[in-house]
Amino acid sequence: MRLLLTIQYKGTNFCGWQIQPNCRTVQQTLSDAIFEVTGENVTLHASGRTDAGVHALGQRVHFDSNTKIPPEKLPFALNTNLPDDLKVIACEQVSYDFDARFNVKRKTYVYKFYSSPHENPMLFDGYAHLPIVPDYQKMRAAADVIEGEHDFKCCQATGGHVKTTVRTVYSIDIKKDGEIYEIAVTGNGFLYNMVRIIAGTIYYAGIGRISEDDIKSAFLTNDRTKMGITLEAKGLYLVKVMY
Amino acid sequence: MRLLLTIQYKGTNFCGWQIQPNCRTVQQTLSDAIFEVTGENVTLHASGRTDAGVHALGQRVHFDSNTKIPPEKLPFALNTNLPDDLKVIACEQVSYDFDARFNVKRKTYVYKFYSSPHENPMLFDGYAHLPIVPDYQKMRAAADVIEGEHDFKCCQATGGHVKTTVRTVYSIDIKKDGEIYEIAVTGNGFLYNMVRIIAGTIYYAGIGRISEDDIKSAFLTNDRTKMGITLEAKGLYLVKVMY
C-alpha cells in the first residue's frame, strides 16, 4: 500500500530534507525509523525539499510499504524511534497514483521574525531577529503588489532550475503580536528561496528601504536587486501542503 | 555604582543559575561577559536561583561596578559577548541599599504545556508535553483553591530549607490557545519546586486525577502526596520580578 505521512521537524539541527553524506538529514532519520518499525528500506518522497535550518509543521511524505501496522497506529510506533526534533503526526493510506510532490495544489509557508532592540534567547532558532521595527501598512502594501500571478524570476536564488518561473501567490497574510511578526504565503508553487525573498522584500518595504514601485519594476524587469534581502532559513516554516 | 540588570535565558543548556564546577551556568556565563566588557570580576546577585532547564524572560540581577559605560549602553556591550541563549535586555542604576533578592515583593512564573497526541518538535525544549487533554473549568476550580495565603508545605520538594512555608499566591491565570496552555502564578515568594507542583496539581485536577477536596485536604494536612506531580523544569519560565 501507499502511505502518506504528515511530519513536523525543527530544522535547526538538520542539513535539510534530502539525504546527503556525512550530514544529518530529515529523510535519512525518518527512513531509519521506518526501517526500525517495519523492517523495510523504503524510498521517501516529500512534497518538496526544505533547506538546512528550515522548519516544517505540515510536511507531507509518501512511501510504499507492506507493513501490517494500521496507518493510524504507525505515527505512535515511528515516534518512539524518532528524535525530539522530528515527529510524525498523521498517516493515511492513499492510492498508488497519488504522489506527495506532483499532486501538490497549494502550499503555505510562514516566515517568522521579531523586532526588538535585543535578541530574545527563547526565539533564536525559530525566528529571525530584525531590530528595526517595520511599518505594518507599508508591509501590507508591498504584500498587495506581490499577491497574484507573476513571473517570479526576481524572487529566485541562483541554483534553481525550473521550466517556468511563473507562479501564483494566492494570499499573503501578515500577523503582528507585540514584537513578533508572521508572514504567511500561500501559492501554487515556489521557486528556490522565493518565500525568504518575499519575506525580505516585505520587511524592506516596511522599513522604507524599497518602495512598491521597486517591486513592480522588479517583476517587469526580472531584476533580483530591486527586491529585498533573502532572510535567514531559521525563520521559515513549511506549514501546510494541500492536494 | 550598583546596577540592576534584566536578563533572559533559555534554560535548556544551562545547569541553572548558580555557579558550580564543571557545568555551564547562567551566573558564570554572565560574569564572564561582564569581565570581558568592564575588566571587573563582579559578584552577581539574582532575584533567586533557577534550576537546570528553567527559562527566564525577566530575571533580575544586581552587582556593583565602576564601569564608565552608561547603564543604558551596557546591554548592547554585554550582548555581543553573550551566547544566543542568554541576553541582557535592560540595565538601570539603583541605590546601594537595593538588593535584587531581598527587595523582591512579587514574582510571576508561567508554566507552559501542550496537549496533543504526538510531541511537537518546535515545542520540545520550552513546553511540557501532557497528552491527556485537561478540562479548563476543573483546572480553574483547582486554581481557585490554591490562590490566597496558605501553608504551602504540601507544595515543596525536599531540599528546601526556609523559616516559614506560608506564602501568598496573589493570582493564577490560565490561558488556553488551541493545544497550548499557560498557567501564570504570581506570589510573594515560592518554595522549592512550588510552581511546578502547583502546575502539576492544576493539570491533575484538569484530567480528574485529583479533586478540589484533595487540594484543600493537602493544605490542612501538609500532605504532598495529595497534590499533583512535579512537572518538568523545561516548561517553567521566570517571567517577572516586582520590587
Image (spheres, coloured by chain):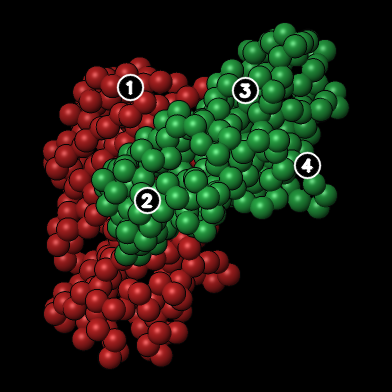
Chain colours: A green, B red
Q: Which residue is mark 2?
A: A213
Are both tags, 3 and 1, on one chain? Answer: no
- Nearer to us of marks 2 and 1 is 2
Above or below, comparing residue A210 to residue A167 in the picture: below
The residue tagged 1 is: B206
* Badge 3 amino acid: Val
Please state which of the two labelled residues, at mark 4 or mark 1, is closer to the viewer. 4
**Quarter of the image where one finds residue B204:** top left
Judging depth in this view, the residue of B113 and A106 nearest the camera is A106
Q: Which mark is residue B37?
A: none
First along the sequence among labels 4 and 2: 4
Packing grade of label 3 (10 A; few <14, some 14-19, many >=20) is some
Q: Position of residue A201 (x, y in %)?
A: 44, 51
Between the C-alphas of marks 4 and 2, the distance is 41 Å
State the image coordinates of residue B72 (x, y, percent, origin top left): 24, 76
Q: Residue at horizontal 51%, vertical 36%?
A: A150
Eyeballing the image, is B32 above or below B220?
A: below
Q: Secondary structure at mark 1?
A: helix
Q: Give the residue pinned by disc 3.
A: A104
The residue indicated by pointer 4 is: A19
- Kindly identify which chain the residue marked by label 4 belongs to: A
Crowd class of label 2 (few under 14; some 14 to 19; many from 20; radius 10 Å): few
Which kind of residue does numbered mark 4 sit on? Ile
How far apart, in angstroms, are the residues tagged by discs 4 and 1?
44 Å
Task: Give residue A138's position: percent from left, percent from top.
Answer: 29, 49
Give the structural element (helix, strand or loop) at label 4: loop
The quadrant of the image that shows the N terminus of chain B is bottom left
